Image (cartoon, helix red, strand yellow):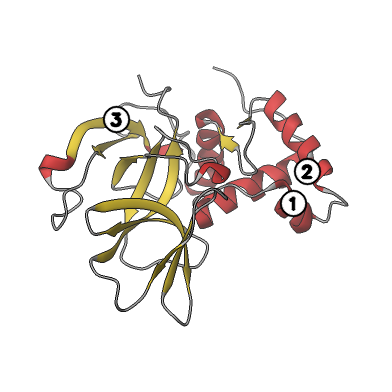
Amino acid sequence: MNDSPKLTQRQQQVLDLVQNAIERTGAPPTRAEIAAELGFKSANAAEEHLQALARKGAIELLGGTSRGIRLKSDTLRALHQARMAPYGKQPMLPMAGLAQLSLPLVGRVAAGSPILAQEHIEQTYAVEASMFQRRPDYLLRVRGQSMRDAGILDGDLLAVQKAKEAKNGQIVVARLGDEVTVKRFRRTDEGVDLLPENPDFLPIRVTAETADFELEGIAVGLIRSSPLM
């Protein structure tokens, strides 16, 4: 119903940076990272631009987390349409069936069985494809607060693309025995570290001796549990 918000050049740069960080790593940048990338003198300058973007309805800010930035679905849709414009004159219309994905929501996962086994699927959600830069294969309900400072909270639905490899810094879904965990991925000479985004939690070190470790996928988006009808 509303046109996309009118942004200043600086605000557009900040929005593009947030979008690119989410696309690349699965999580938004911190204020300090925005300041460093765009040459601001302090994180406060980044905060001012984020507040302006929030007032214009382009993003949502979540208090209490260093990465509490959300792109709203209308913003994602507008960005997607802008990217598609050079490839055709027809506007991208929100047509049901063409613009939606049907994603299974994975609940508790039993040890030794595929994460998308039928017994793990609680229900199926129809979500707009324009919400994601990379196509997810399923949704996983987040449990706990270990990724709080990445803006990933208990009860959120993490959009996951199946993958067996990940790059350093990406947020991944990994299986350790009968536990499925969401952490930030880092490969080292000794193995793999699964890093929390909450100082109350310890990193998980995965080595050649670690039994039943498997990478299940990488995060490609996040849906607040409440907005899903």
Name which quarter of the figure residue 204 lies in: bottom left
Q: Nearer the viewer, residue 213 or 91?
A: 213
What's the distance in space between the residues labelled 1 and 3, CA to CA? Answer: 36 Å
Tell me, for residue 9, which label it has, or none.
none
What's the distance in space between the residues labelled 2 and 1, CA to CA? Answer: 8 Å
Q: Residue at x 16, y 49 (%)?
A: 110
Decide: marks 2, 1 in contact (CB < 8 A)?
Answer: yes
| Mark in front: 2 vs 3 | 2
Residue 186, above or below 179: below
What residue type is disc 2 on?
Answer: Ala
Give x and y (percent) for residue 140.
32, 42
Is 113 left or right of 12, judged from the image as shown?
left
The secondary element bearing badge 3 is classed as strand
Residue 103, above or below 198: above
Q: Nearer the viewer, residue 187 or 93?
A: 187
**Circle 1 residue:** 32
What's the distance in space between the residues labelled 2 and 3, CA to CA? Answer: 35 Å
Give x and y (percent) for residue 164.
31, 66
Within 10 angstroms of label 3, few (less than 14), some, or many (20 or more) residues?
A: some
User: Tag 3 or tag 2, which sits nearer the N-term?
Assistant: 2
What residue type is disc 3 on?
Answer: Ala
The secondary element bearing badge 1 is classed as helix
Q: Residue at x 66, y 50 (%)?
A: 17
Residue 72, above or below 143: above
Give x and y (percent) for residue 92.
45, 34
Tell me, for residue 46, which label it has, or none.
2
What residue type is disc 1 on?
Answer: Ala
Is 37 left or right of 127, judged from the image as shown?
right
The secondary element bearing badge 2 is classed as helix
Give the farthest residue toward the right.
Answer: 41
Q: Looking at the rendering, in which quadrant would you find the N terminus?
A: top right
